[in-house]
Image (cartoon, rainbow, N blue to C red):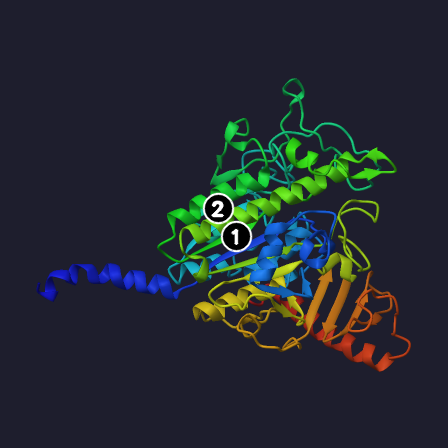
């Protein structure tokens, strides 16, 4: 048979070859999960078998950081590779992702990728017409939805939802006091007669709200998010894609199925069943199960070897030390720049590229996803705007490097920190003295060494000030 008869297949074959050369990306993040809440960091109070399997098959980071101790800023760091103050997102529910920011979605779309975002968005409002969630429909000032940032497929909420029956207000109150903002102790599935809408909605496009009373939106929220993620993966399995999957769990209000709550029936507080903890643990186990479903889908479609899957949390656990979320041995929790507020579970699984059981001691951060992916796909930035992240590709490829190529800076509402190797300076309020810690010998930040090493503090503070001046310039529009 003459070869020319098959020329019509050439474009299709070339497309397949090109797709095979381009890795897929699935970036998974949960909300308020503590460093110590997962089995692979030594946690025994919650079952996380799928995440533990991911670590065994992939790369674990011993020092992985969220860029901020609250959620919205960390999210901005992932999609831009830049400190959140540069992007116009200063803290939770303040600011939005500016139109001038160049995101992962836009960069990969330019390389022929399909783009999807599933779960929480929290980088701006999603509606101009409906009063909903934290800020939606209260004017256009913070309107910045996924579809305005070149996201092809969206199934997202502006902000938090309950982690079970996500459109409906939970019932009941916590068995122990919880001092965080209103409604966060509620954890029971409401009876039909008592049901009331929670006020956060799922959106799929401009003013395209999913009916909040739809049966489709009932049940475990993490499972619901992953159902849409897997549909996206199935639709794009023959072409390169990025799926950003941001769970609501275990952000309050935590609610779990009766089955998952029953799985923690032995969790008590002084002999009294602790329903709050049971629901927290149950929703994390449901989240873990949903991660397992994503992994299974990648293997079913034979694209796991060509897909980089990441997992982390957006900040440390909510509440205080009596709350069910655990930060491990570290000081501080959510809203703190001490280690417990920003050091989070972090891993990458990529069967085709990462040696099973790999471990890295290099400081890594959510801000590093962007430059890592840009290097992997060979994308050059369209301008010289500063990036704060570094490529993790050497670590992915097995490098034993432990030193981060450049220091890592933090700032949020006056709080500040600077990580340079094992040394860290931190202050919890603008104008207060810097504290100095050697995280290599003192990861619990028990011994402030500022008085013993004043020159070290001075040098690091000067570096932070120089970096912060660059961040402020970006914030004022210098990069656009």
User: Which is in the foreground here, disc 1 or disc 2?
Assistant: 2
Crowding at label 1, few (<14), some or many (≥20) Cα neighbours within 10 Å?
many
Q: Looking at the image, is 73 positioned above or below residue 283? A: below
Residue 244 numbered mark, or none: 1
- Apparent side of residue 232 relative to residue 18 in the rendered image (left or right): right
* C-alpha distance separating marks 1 and 2: 9 Å
Residue 229 numbered mark, or none: 2
From the viewer's side, name the closer residue of 367 and 353: 353
Q: Looking at the image, is 227 positioned above or below residue 307? A: above
Could one spot residue 147 in this view of the protein? yes
- Apparent side of residue 139 relative to residue 147 in the rendered image (left or right): right
From the viewer's side, name the closer residue of 19 and 271: 271
Q: Position of residue 94 (x, y in %)?
A: 67, 50
Q: Earlier in the sequence, mark 1 or mark 2?
A: 2
Q: Position of residue 143 (x, y in %)?
A: 56, 45
Residue 118 numbered mark, or none: none
Could one spot residue 247 in this view of the protein? no
From the viewer's side, name the closer residue of 295 and 216: 295
Could you say which quadrant of the image residue 460 lies in? bottom right
Crowding at label 2, few (<14), some or many (≥20) Cα neighbours within 10 Å?
many
Q: Position of residue 156 (x, y in %)?
A: 53, 43
Q: Going 45% across and 53% down the picture, which residue do you hit?
A: 299
Callout 2: helix, strand or loop? Answer: helix
Quadrant (top left, top right, bottom left, bottom right) of the N terminus: bottom left
């Amino acid at each position: 048979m003459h070869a020319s008869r098959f020329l019509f297949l050439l474009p299709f074959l070339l497309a397949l070859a090109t797709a095979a050369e381009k890795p897929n990306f699935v970036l998974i993040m949960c909300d308020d999960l503590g460093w110590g809440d997962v089995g692979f960091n030594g946690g025994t109070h919650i079952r996380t078998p799928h995440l533990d399997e991911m670590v065994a098959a992939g790369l674990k980071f011993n020092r992985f950081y969220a860029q901020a101790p609250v959620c919205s800023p960390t999210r901005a760091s992932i999609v831009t590779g830049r400190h959140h103050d540069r992007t116009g997102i200063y803290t939770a529910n303040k600011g939005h992702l500016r139109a001038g920011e160049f995101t992962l979605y836009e960069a990969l779309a330019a390389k022929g990728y399909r783009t999807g975002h599933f779960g929480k968005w929290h980088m701006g409002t999603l509606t101009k017409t409906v009063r909903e969630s934290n800020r939606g429909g209260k004017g256009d000032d913070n309107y910045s939805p996924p579809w305005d940032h070149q996201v092809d497929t969206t199934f997202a909420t502006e902000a938090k939802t309950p982690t079970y029956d996500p459109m409906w207000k939970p019932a009941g109150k916590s068995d122990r006091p919880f001092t965080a903002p209103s409604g966060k102790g509620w954890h029971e599935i409401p009876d039909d007669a008592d049901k009331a809408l929670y006020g956060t909605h799922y959106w799929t496009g401009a003013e395209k709200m999913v009916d909040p009373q739809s049966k489709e939106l009932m049940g475990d929220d993490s499972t619901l998010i992953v159902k849409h993620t897997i549909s996206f993966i199935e639709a794009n399995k023959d072409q390169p894609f990025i799926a950003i999957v941001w769970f609501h769990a275990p952000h309050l209000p935590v609610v779990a199925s009766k089955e998952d709550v029953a799985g923690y029936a032995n969790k008590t507080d002084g002999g009294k069943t602790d329903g709050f903890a049971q629901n927290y643990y149950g929703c994390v186990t449901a989240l873990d199960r949903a991660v397992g479903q994503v992994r299974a889908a990648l293997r079913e479609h034979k694209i796991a070897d060509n897909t980089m899957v990441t997992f982390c949390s957006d900040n440390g656990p909510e509440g205080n030390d009596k709350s069910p979320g655990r930060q491990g041995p570290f000081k501080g929790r959510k809203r703190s720049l001490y280690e417990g507020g920003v050091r989070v579970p972090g891993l990458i699984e990529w069967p085709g590229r990462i040696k099973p059981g790999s471990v890295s001691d290099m400081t890594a951060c959510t801000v590093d996803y962007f430059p890592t992916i840009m290097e992997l796909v060979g994308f050059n930035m369209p301008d010289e705007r500063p990036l704060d992240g570094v490529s993790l590709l050497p670590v992915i490829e097995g490098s034993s490097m432990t030193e981060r190529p450049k220091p890592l800076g933090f700032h949020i509402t006056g709080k500040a920190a600077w990580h340079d190797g094992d040394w860290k300076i931190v202050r919890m309020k603008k104008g207060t003295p810097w504290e100095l810690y050697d995280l290599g010998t003192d990861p619990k930040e028990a011994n402030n060494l500022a008085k013993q090493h004043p020159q070290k503090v001075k040098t690091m503070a000067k570096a932070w000030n120089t970096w912060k001046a660059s961040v402020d310039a970006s914030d004022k529009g210098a990069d656009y």
